[in-house]
Amino acid sequence: MSDSIEVDLAIVGSGIAGLCAALAAWDAGCRSILVIESEGVVGGSSRLSGGILMGAGTRLQRAKGIEDSPDDMFHEYMAWNAWRLDAAVVRRFCDEAGRTVDWLQDLGVPFTGDLILGGDEPQPRCYPVAGSGQGVIDALHARCREREIDIALGKRVDHLLMENGRVVGVRVGDEEVRAGSVVITTGGFGANRERLAKHYPSAAATGDWAWYIGADGARGDAFEFAAQADAQITGHDRGLRLLHPNFWQMVEAYQPAWVVVVNADGRRFYDEAAPYGIVDDVHRWQGDRAFVMFDDAQLRFEGERAQYKDPVMGARIKTPNWTPEVVDPQVAAGAMYRADTIAELARAMGVPEANLVATVERYNQFCADGEDREFAKAAKFLQPIAVAPFYAALVKPATICLTSCGLRIDPDGRVLSNTGGVIPGLFAGGECTGGVLGDRYMGSGNSLGNSATMGRNAGLSAATSVARTGR
Ligand SMILES: Cc1cc2nc3c(=O)[nH]c(=O)nc-3n(C[C@H](O)[C@H](O)[C@H](O)COP(=O)(O)OP(=O)(O)OC[C@H]3O[C@@H](n4cnc5c(N)ncnc54)[C@H](O)[C@@H]3O)c2cc1C
């Protein structure tokens, strides 16, 4: 990049949203595109991700005879999130997510061909990619190179250039990039403690336990741009947190379904096999303090068992935390509780003894009956807590996967101003936006699906705007 250059389209950030924006703009005929990336490597958090995308009505579904539609996805999505979202934007996401999966497939993203349940949807609409997130980024980066779309690495955009209320480019230190339109795809803010405290306080509230699993570039620079352009922010205190026992920084999306989880009162409060997308919300409701419990028979069980909701991941995933190799040393180190009776365990945990004893007795009866009459956990996961010694560990939803507060957009990806109109020349898509992901994560694929679809959407709108206005 020289001190001042001019392009039709400047895209800030090279994650899946930025690369999809660039490729969509190219599809729309835009040939002067610059992607600007603050880090030394292309891909942001997208590159580190599991590489699972969500979308309804895809070729991959049709090939397997699965009937699904964007309309079904929209209604499930809105109900799941109690309609506390920008419905018109979610509608665009749901309408385009399946087509975006097809488009990515055409671009050479190596989908494995499998379909999985990412959360609680009635039919599978989530698609793993070979090579996970890096597999997605490698394919998109290769297509950008073939189309000679420039990606400037190590350039952190610090300012929007504004003239008469219109965004006319960006600045990186002393360097200026003048552009007909600017697309912000800078990802989330999980790597920025101050921004977490301000915009996702529930994540910051887990204190020392909180750890972010994404990329360093997720500093929330979009909030700076919002301040410069007087843009609206939406989605306060939203994101995705997963449970962990603080033994180490190890991601475990699903606790094994055979454990029992109790709150500070010693009572169960949800189906332990529920989709992980509800964990953030359900644990927040309990003050973010809960205990995972099991007995010695469960811990040392060596046969095959269904550990997770089928067919999300089947029993293929081995729990990283709840094995004898981990638990025995953690007990010895004082990081877990172990006792010969439930009453003794309750005293160690600091929960009401009578409550915990009653909870376990009741749960064991459900196991004997083959029916969980409290939280309807599937019978195949019901195993009694009966063989001493008994174990418990404090867990908190402190693994921060992504953030969902950010720039407010309209369905075309135009950024909205605080006064409600669109900000001319400014578009956004992906994790840097709010209003698309809600209080409950739909499941694996929700965020990459959003970033790919709405990044593509923003790139297309921005290119169309440049073509129409000549700017
Ligand atoms: C370990 C992990 C696993 C995940 N697995 C899944 C999954 O399987 N499915 C799913 O749906 N979601 C998953 N997610 C979430 C998902 O990966 C992200 O929400 C998504 O990738 C965000 O994409 P993005 O393009 O919006 O942002 P990013 O991929 O984070 O890209 C943003 C880019 O902008 C750059 N940038 C930031 N500020 C500036 C600036 N000022 N100037 C220039 N560049 C800047 C950043 O460096 C970064 O490269 C996962 C997340 C993690 C961390």
Image: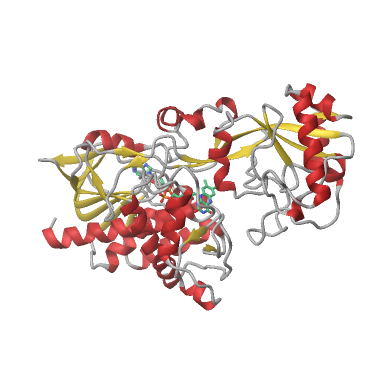
**Pick the front one: 326 or 287:** 287
**Pick the front one: 111 or 157:** 111
Q: Residue at x 20, y 55 (%)?
A: 7
Q: In this rendering, would 190 be left or right of 326?
A: left
**Pick the front one: 261 or 409:** 261
Q: Position of residue 189 (x, y in %)?
A: 42, 37
Q: Position of residue 163 (x, y in %)?
A: 12, 41
Above-or-below relation of 463 to 41: below
- The quadrant of the image that shows the C terminus is bottom left
Total numbered badges shown on the rendered structure: 0
Q: Residue at x 40, y 32 (%)?
A: 199
Q: In this rendering, would 92 be left or right of 267?
A: left
Above-or-below relation of 172 to 94: above
Q: Is residue 330 visible?
A: no
Q: Is residue 319 visible?
A: yes
Place residue 320 in its image quadrant.
Answer: top right
Q: In this rendering, would 389 be left or right of 227?
A: right
Place residue 328 in its image quadrant.
Answer: top right
**Pick the front one: 91 or 182:** 91
Place residue 395 in its image quadrant.
Answer: top right
Q: Residue at x 21, y 38 (%)?
A: 229
Colour pattern? secondary structure
Above-or-below relation of 258 to 343: below
Q: Position of residue 312 (x, y in %)?
A: 63, 59
Residue lying farthest to the left in this orientation: 164
Q: Position of residue 310 (x, y in %)?
A: 67, 60
